Image (cartoon, helix red, strand yellow):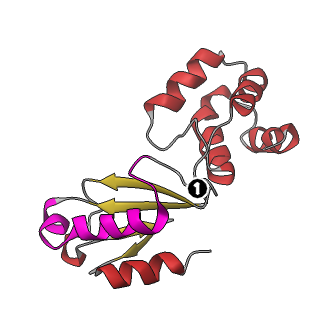
Amino acid sequence: MNNDRIDQIIDKHQGEASSLIQVLLEIQSENHWLPKDALRRVGEKLQVPLSRIQHIATFYKAFSLVPKGRHEVHVCMGTACHVRGAERVLDKVQDLTGIKPGETDLDLKFSLETVNCLGCCALGPVMEIDGKTHGKLSRAETEDVLKSYD
C-alpha cells in the first residue's frame, strides 16, 4: 500500500488522531494486513507514537501485522458445530489449503482461523469465508465451497 493511498484514508477521517482505529481498519480491509511502513505513515500523519499504534494493532484481533490471505476462512468449533462434525470440516479445509489455524498459504489466497461461535448454531457445522456464512456442511460441500473462491 503506497503513502498516497494511506494519506487519502487519513484525510477521509479529517486527520484526527481520534480516528486511529477507523484508519487502521480501513487499511487492514484494503491490504489484508498492517505493514510496518503503513503504521509509520499513520503515526507521522496523525502524530501518534508508533508504540501506541502497535499496541492497538496487537490488542484487537481484527488487525494483523503479518500478511493474510485474500480470503479469510473461519471454522466454528463451538459446541453445536462440534457435535455436528466441525472437526471434519476443519480437517477438510486443512487438507485442501495445506494450512493450519492461524496460518496463511504461500499464495496468500487463504488464511484459516477457528472460532468458538459464529452465532448461527442451528446451521452447524458452519464455516465463514469473507463474512459469508456456509452452514450444514459435509466434507464434500466444504470442498465445493472452497473451490468457489478464486
The location of residue 15, given as percent across then percent down, is: 75, 32
Q: Amino acid at mark 1?
A: Gly
Q: Is residue 131 visible in the rendered structure shown here?
A: no
Depth check: 117 or 16 in front? 117
Secondary structure beneath dot 1 equals loop
Q: Is residue 113 magenta?
A: no
Depth check: 19 or 39 in front? 39
Residue at horizontal 68 percent and vertical 53 percent from the top: 30
Q: Is residue 101 magenta?
A: yes
Q: Is residue 17 visible in the rendered structure shown here?
A: yes
Q: Answer with left or right where residue 24 lies relative to residue 58.
A: right
Residue stretch in magenta: 79-102
Label 1 sits on residue: 69
| Figure quadrant of residue 93 | bottom left
Which quadrant of the rendered structure holds the C terminus?
bottom right
Residue at horizontal 57 percent and vertical 24 percent from the top: 54
Q: Where is 2 relative to 135, above or below? A: above
Q: Where is 123 relative to 109, above or below? A: below
Q: Where is 16 relative to 76, above or below? A: above
Which quadrant of the rendered structure holds the N terminus?
top right
Rate crowding at label 1 as few (under 14), some (14 to 19) or many (20 or more) other CA atoms within 10 Å: some
Q: Answer with left or right where residue 103 lies relative to residue 42.
A: left
Q: Where is 126 relative to 101, above or below? A: below
Depth check: 55 or 136 in front? 136
Depth check: 72 or 29 in front? 72
Residue at horizontal 61 percent and vertical 29 percent from the top: 18
The location of residue 144, given as percent across then percent down, is: 45, 84
Secondary structure mostly seen in the magenta stretch: helix
- How many marks the image carries: the answer is 1
Residue at horizontal 62 percent and vertical 52 percent from the top: 29
The location of residue 4, given as percent across then percent down, is: 88, 41
| Figure quadrant of residue 43 | top right
